[in-house]
Image (cartoon, grey):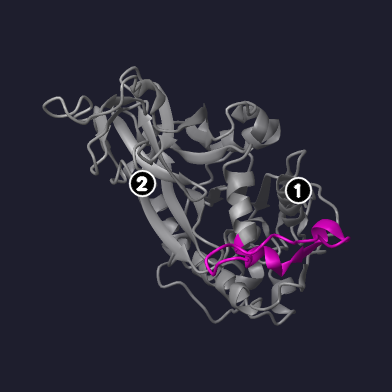
Amino acid sequence: MTTANEPKKDALIWPEEGESRVPYQVYNDPGIYKKEMDNIFRGSTWNYLGLEVEIPNKGDYKTTFIGNTPVVVTRNSDGSIHAFVNRCAHRGATVCMDTCGNAKTLTCVYHAWVYDMKGDLKGVPFKNGVNGQGGMPEGFDTGKHSLQKVKVDTHLGIIFGSFDHQIEPVQDYLGEKMCGYLSRIFSRPVKVLGYQRQDMKNNWKLYFENVKDSYHASLLHLFFSTFGVNRLSQKGGIDLDPTGRHHVSYTYGSLNEDTDVYKNSDLRSYSSKYQLEDPSLLVGRNEFTDGITLAIQSLFPNMVVQQIHNALAIRQLLPKGTDSCELVWTYLGFADDSEEMTKIRLKQSNLVGPAGFVSLEDGGVGELVQKGIVGADQELSFIEMGGTGVESQSFRATESSIRGFWKNYRQFMGY
């Protein structure tokens, strides 16, 4: 007998078609969600935690999540970076309640247990009791009551964390190809221009699918196709790492490119009647020598790196339940940017974020799917654009990278 609050049993049987069919049950089942947190986010994966530039000084810290597990990332007094679960070893209370700050120690407000910036327990009030009464039992060892440690690795100033302390180095996990794409941006010192947070009423996987879905970009987003930021008629492609879990969608765009393929198709997403009140929004600079004007890179399971012309950002995906997730946007520039270049980046960042000219629709379409699949656990999505395989392709009218996500998802989940 099960209680009302107990996740129902995971009885999912994956369809024989493989990655080109996805049961809608995976977006609705609380038991599957719990298994994802255990097998993927708390499993053998590297999760994006932040940037070194966000904690530059000794004693700096920031709070974040790995899946639904709260985590603190710190810069210790010796300059080393550490991460640990934000949960007191005493009674489970949240230890660090601020999003960021600087401190020598972290103290749990409940019973004032004190931890250093490596997460080690350093002080317990009244450990020896009061007036010879009470206190901790004989043999109590503070060294056995540290905060749960998270393995940390960094690459190009990006901080990753994993609950698997035997996991391969992060560069091996990402692979040479994905590290190469990261180096386009992170081989130069970056600076943080700002943050935004976005709540979405849909399962986390629907957003990650959307990020990998180059097919929708110029169909859903009127701004992209109308103003020539991203069209499927432009030169570009999809690049996957050998496992298929990570991907990059890239475009060599031109604002003056012929639009007949959109004009003649009578698509909702293209309209010549729209004009920009401020055309300088799309006036930028060609700053990448490879000529790529738009690149969206996803790193399994929770990180997206974005270059849309000169708008640079990291998106961190945080699951919040079967039908809810949060997206944390970190907007970036380069440390040596001029004031004019920073203004260009900030202006173009109006394309993205919770109310962006483009991203506004991404934040809503996942909810449309979540609403549409209620009561449809036995039904399947159909993912055969560009074939049924998982491979890099020199075009973007494809769902290859989505199939790559589901291939790896099935491996982690045992389906």
Checking the image for residue 206, the label placed there is: none
Q: Is residue 19 visible?
A: yes
- At 74% from the left and 58% from the top, the residue drawn is 396
Tell which of 406 and 237 is nearer to you: 406
Name the amino acid, label 1.
Answer: Gly
Return the x and y of residue 201 as percentages of the image width and height.
50, 69
- Name the residue carrying label 2: 193
**Labels in figure, total:** 2
- Image coordinates for residue 3, horizontal then vertical, percent: 55, 67
What crowding class fits label 2: few (fewer than 14 Cα within 10 Å), some (14-19), or many (20 or more)?
some
For the view shown, which residue lies furthest in the front direction?
A: 133
Task: Say above or below: 80 vs 298.
Answer: above
- Residue 151 coordinates in the image, percent (x, y): 51, 29
Q: Is residue 161 above or below residue 353?
A: above
Q: Which residue is mark 1?
A: 414
Whether residue 299 is visible to the viewer of this picture, yes or no, is: no
Tag 1's secondary structure? loop
Identify the residue at horizontal 66%, vertical 71% (top origin): 219
Q: From the image, give the main secondary structure of the stretch colored magenta.
A: loop
Give the residue type that dot 2 points to: Leu
Which residue is pictured at 64% across the width and 45% down the height?
39
The CA distance from mark 2 to mark 1 is: 41 Å
Residue lying at 48% horizontally and 68% vertically, measured from the top left: 357
Kindly indicate the quadrant of the structure image that contains residue 22: bottom right
288 or 353, which is in the foreground? 353
Q: Which residues are magenta?
A: 1-30
Q: Is residue 34 left or right of residue 352?
A: right
For marks 2 and 1, give the one nearer the viewer.
1
Q: Quadrant of the N terminus?
A: bottom right
Residue 143 falls left or right of residue 389: left
